[in-house]
Image (cartoon, grey):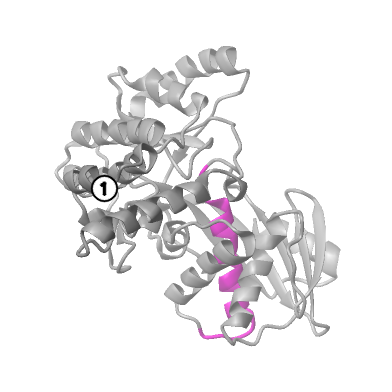
Amino acid sequence: MKEIISKAFSEHFGIHPTFIVRSPGRINLIGEHTDYNNGYVLPAAIDKAIYSGFSARNDGQIHLYSIDSNQVFVSDIKKMERSGLLWPDYILGVADELIKAGHTVGGFNAVVTGDIPIGAGLSSSAALECSIAFGLNAMFGLGLEKIEMVKTAQKAENNFVGMQCGIMDMFASVMGKKNMAILLNCDTLEYKYFPFELGEYKVLLLDTQVKHSLASSAYNDRRRETAQGLAILQAVYPQVEKLADATVDMMLDAIEDPVILKRCIYVTEENLRILGMVEDLAAGRFDDAGKKMFRTHDGLSKMYEVSCAEADFLVDSVRNDESVAGARMMGGGFGGCTINLVRANAIDGLVARLAPVYKEKFGLELKSYVAVPADGTSLI
């Protein structure tokens, strides 16, 4: 990737990049749509990443090139607007947030590429944003701590891109450690690492090949619905600061709207599952951990309603497979990957069994990836 970036940089800008940054995607073992509800999540950075090369300019312009889409975009550091192409917005948004925070950011060149499957729910957008924050911090000597770069990347997606995501994806991308998962409290940002030890199991991702654009999807609606539910709860139970503080009985008592009620119950139950799964994994109870993954999928599909027919089919297809401890849809929803806890020696056979029936039912090729926990964002 370093050679690919350097070659493209030289061809487009006539110089070699001053900095190259690697920023990984992420998986999330359990804890979906809990981050923006100030709950827990259980992610890990993975061995697929976005790579960005940088050099400074002295004319106040921003020149961007995406190797993967073979597109160029030019902007001005003093007048940044949404591009209409989406991928430049993740870059411009980070620069915009840094400037708004009072940092001195000049013009720059950037070339980006990566091996994260786009639209697969592995947070390629967060990885891109974090790579930009890291690169601009290094190039302009901003002196930012890692957590400041995480928050800058999240603000870029919230404010410039318009997707009201939580902090999990950016946190995992920057703070990940090789062979470690992270238990993150998204309310306090307290976190701890623990060994990513799955015994005879590995994490298999099955890519539905259904692409989503969360910024224009029901994702923001879900955030609005759970915020509305929290406000209703707080009017009756002032001690409730977040949905994780409330019981299902409280929700049944206070929330009349059946849709909002379903959304809130899911979030509260998911928080409990996360803490239970941490205990299961630590004790090597992989069957119990897997059962929680299946329950999470059912909650996401039926209560939070962010799954799709393709993801439901893949999860249902492994429910009774003895080699699979658990499975669920992963990411914001409406497509992307399912995450499966599968015995290592059964992975090839499982994919061989599912691929033809998936192709027959949906007319789509089933792609698969084994996810390996990796270090977070860094200069290379």
Q: Tell me which residue sits at (45%, 74%) in the image.
A: 146
Residue 138 counted in the magenta span: yes
Q: Is 76 situated left or right of 335 in this image? A: right
Say whether residue 65 is magenta: no
Q: Position of residue 134 (x, y in %)?
A: 56, 72
Front-most of residues 194 and 152 = 152
Q: Residue at x 80, y 85 (%)?
A: 58
Residue 261 lies, in percent from the top left, at 32, 42
The image quadrant of residue 245 is: bottom left
The residue sitting at 80% across, 51% down in the picture is: 70
Quarter in which the C terminus is drawn: bottom right
Which part of the image, by quadrant, shows the N terminus? bottom right
User: Pointer 1: residues within 10 angstroms few (<14), some, or many (20+)?
Assistant: many
Label count reads 1
Picture quadrant of residue 21: bottom right
Residue 340 seen in the current view:
no
Q: Position of residue 361 (x, y in %)?
A: 56, 14
> What is the secondary structure assignment of the residue under circle 1?
helix
Q: Give the magenta-colored segment's residue range.
A: 121-143
Q: Quadrant of residue 167?
A: bottom left
Left or right placement of residue 372 versus residue 240 in this view = right
* Residue 107, horizontal then vertical, whole percent: 75, 79
Label 1 sits on what residue type? Thr
Identify the residue at image location x=38%, y=36%.
Answer: 300
Residue labelled with disc 1:
268
